[in-house]
Image (cartoon, grey):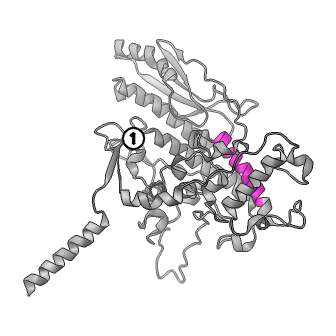
Amino acid sequence: MNRAFRFLMAAAAGLLLAACERPPVDSVQHGYRGTGMLQVYNPRTVDAQIPGNQPPAALPAAPTEGPKARDIYQNVQVLGDLNVAQFTRHMAAITSWVAPEQGCAYCHNLQNLADDSKYTKVVARKMLLMTQQINSQWQPHVAQTGVTCYTCHRGNNIPQQVWFTTPPQQNGSNFIGDQAGQNQAASVVGLASLPYDPFTPYLLNDLPIRVGGDTALPTGNRASTKQAEFTYSLMAHMSTSLGVNCTYCHNTRNFASWEGSSTQRVTAWHGIRMARELNVKHMLPLTDTFPAHRKGPLGDVAKVNCSTCHQGAYKPLYGAQMAKDFPELLGTAPAVAALPAPLAEAMRAVMYFDVGSPVLQGTQQKGLAQVIVSLTEKPALKVTISGYHSASGTVAQNQELAKQRAFTVRDSLLAAGVAESRVVLAKPQQTQANTAGEDHDSRRVEVTLK
């Protein structure tokens, strides 16, 4: 009897374990061999996500001729350049994306369509402007795929994946101790005991996310263990939101280095800053517009994070290009001037970077060629790397970006065989902001040999 009981228990345990991740599973390698950059997917989990990530069929295109909407209707503040047929098509699409059950009445007073008394109409107008800005100014993150209202709403009045500021811990008489913002196994961090609010520090405020040191001993790293835990909390949220793991972005041989990391890491870098800007510049100003029942427990508005758009998919809607069927949502992308040629001399080099990017383009990489030759021929020389940033924007953000650009150049030199002991990193330096606020002169890294 005991033997039979043990056999049944073992069989039950085997079934339980198998149910956690029963084969087969799929794997995709998208990084260099030996870096562990392998994604493992469960086909059954992916299959379950597919129905919720299908874009709706686009409405037939409207005629291109006809009077403009702003000339026919009153109080058209957005999309007024569309003709009446195009404008009507877009309103019908928004209704199906956001309020399929309530219809036009969700935003409009049907007795007076020009009336702005419904808060939903005011919010919708602001969200259209936000969508245009995402598509025109955040292409380093959304690329040519773009977003529409459906990307976040998926047929719901309010996107299902939003966040509110977490209320402070109720300590009573403090006899239960301080949870330090963690130990609640929150779903937003994959049910881990990590800090359950990774959004306020990074997607509302701009605290530094990088906590890894550059040395074996903590001689130059002043980030605390608690800061590291908050960073891991954000990373857990990003992994869960995209349905991926750490190796989707990182080179596991050196998490801190951009060298060998995937292009997805750069895309994620822009995504963090995009989410922060959307929350600060678009959502927070609507605080007084939303009624109390649409706010969080502390009276704040709903805000976006990675899962708002991704909802478990590595690309929202698996990369479906809905925005191309609604060009009015693409906005007008600002003209981006081409980067100048790098300065390449035997004892000095200057390389330029795109706006908000720490990635050294191939043409700019050539600026290091002559200094590498000099370092090879003259072993006594040392190289100093200086990152520069403009005076526009926040100092903390600019300094971090200038530092990341300097790290990129340093890693390129190390990859070329230059000993790390010969490389000196200078503190990021500020240049004057021009009238436009940014130019390539402020987005540079200088390399000098001495």
State which region is magenta.
123-138
Q: Residue at x 39, y 50 (%)?
A: 246
Closer to us: 237 or 210: 237
Residue 133 falls within the magenta-colored stretch: yes
Asked where in the image residue 282 lies, by quadrant, the reply is bottom right
Residue 260 in the image: x percent, y percent?
A: 38, 36
**Residue 35 as seen in the image, left or right of residue 317:** left
**Residue 9 on image: x %, y %:** 18, 79
Q: Amino acid at mark 1?
A: Asp
Residue 290 vs residue 76, the one in the foreground:
76
**Mark 1 crowd level (few <14, some 14–19, many ≥20, 10 Å Cα):** few
- Say if residue 323 shows up in the picture: yes
Q: Locate residue 249 relative to residue 2 in the image: left or right.
A: right
* 181 w.r.t. 239: above or below: below
State which quadrant residue 301 falls in. Answer: bottom right
Residue for point 50% across, 16% down: 348
The answer to which of 420 and 132 lies nearer the viewer is 132
Q: Quadrant of the C terminus?
A: top left
Residue wearing tag 1: 214
Is residue 384 one of those drawn in magenta? Answer: no
Q: Where is residue 341 drawn, in percent x and y?
A: 57, 17
